[in-house]
Image: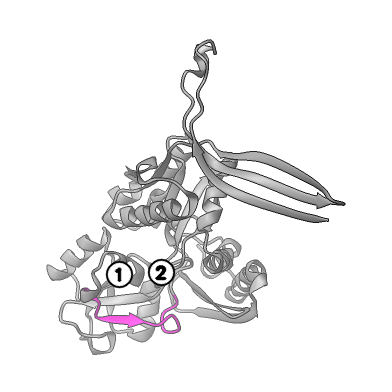
Amino acid sequence: MLDKTIGIPCSFSVTKDAAVSSQLDSIPRIKGFLLIQISFNNCTISIQVRNIFFMKKKITIGSRGSKLATLYAQKVKDQIIKSASFREDEIFIKSISTKGDQIKDIRLSEVGGKGLFSSEIEKQLLKKEIDIAVHALKDMPVNETKGLITDSFLERNDPREILITFNKKKIKDLDVNSIIGTSSYRREFQIKKKRPDLNCKLIRGNVDTRIKKLKDGLYDGILLSSAGMKFLKLDEYITETFETEEIIPSAGQGIIAIQCRENDDEVISILKKINHDQTYRRAHSERNVLKVLEGDCETAVGVHSKIEGDQLTLEAELFSLDGSERYYEKKIVEKSKFREIGEEIGGILKKKSNNSYKK
């Protein structure tokens, strides 16, 4: 017996007779494909034709309103157009103001944590005002919001940390007591491990705002992620790039995460088409470290993974609350065990630290 299945893309309109109830007064253009199954069995040919429909006539993507967040949303839109047969005019980007964007002078941990960047967007997703939410994975809370799922990721961008200084001095050349701007305890402890004689000072705001503060002389240098700088085409400002072995980045840094409603099967099927498998494995392995640690904005932890062939390498470092103690772990496993290795390393660090990283 020979069994062959063929999928044929299609786009067509459905019309109705005038006598049909006015409740059906508009049926959108239906996109999808014809599934043709041909079976040969003892000289008998059996043909089955089924329509597999995508009923949505448009998709609304929600994201933060910053320039960088908009670029992330546009990249997701481009990938959907390329991989899921939607047109440019069928996908809309909606900018959503978040509390994290509005609060610019204090640490997020003092006013609600990472959820300040995502909660407003997630509310609109749950209310079906948007179909997809786009986030920087590193800014998402470790626990998923009930009714939502974050399980698709675009190919990872550069996860490394960078330093910008006004006078182009590298970290080793900065004067004693130079002021470094960062809003992250992790970055503060990591940079002081390299240069204990430097002073770290809180800095908030988008990338342009932070660079302006540097130019205004409020800081001698600022630490940022390479991915954001490259997306914004601001590479010229980069003074120094730190390899992940020098400064381990935040879990999920450089990864664009895509969230939707957990019961929206149609959107889930679309997002599966644009999901990048290696990034998917790396994202879950790194986030699982955070889940075990119950990490939040006050948790100074760096996590980074890489995949080479069939092997996944995961390394993480965790600091005590005051940054005086550092706990490190690194393991190499088969890439199929990406979830388990994250949980294992999280557990090891938690035990080593004796919970000294939490208040």
Residue 83 image offset from top left, x and y in percent: 48, 55
> Is 233 in front, or is 101?
233
In this rendering, the answer to whether 241 lies above or below 233 is below
- Is residue 333 left or right of 274 when viewed as pictured? right
Quadrant for residue 47, please give it.
Answer: top right
Task: Indicate whether residue 131 is drawn in magenta.
Answer: no
* View extreme (right): residue: 42
- Is residue 145 left or right of 111 when viewed as pictured? right
Q: Which residues are magenta?
A: 237-248
Q: Does the image show residue 299?
A: yes
> Is 343 in front, or is 311?
311
Task: Indicate whether residue 246 is drawn in magenta.
Answer: yes
Label 2 with label 1: CB-CB less than 8 Å: yes
Q: Which residue is mark 2?
A: 157
Q: CA distance from mark 2 to mark 1?
A: 9 Å
Q: Earlier in the sequence, mark 2 or mark 1?
A: 2
Residue at 28 percent across and 89 percent down: it is 172
Considering the numbered disc 2 on the image, is that residue within a helix, a strand or a loop?
A: loop
Residue at 41 percent across and 84 percent down: it is 246
Residue 85 image offset from top left, x and y in percent: 47, 48
Q: Quadrant of the N terminus?
A: bottom right
Quadrant for residue 192, please give it.
Answer: bottom left
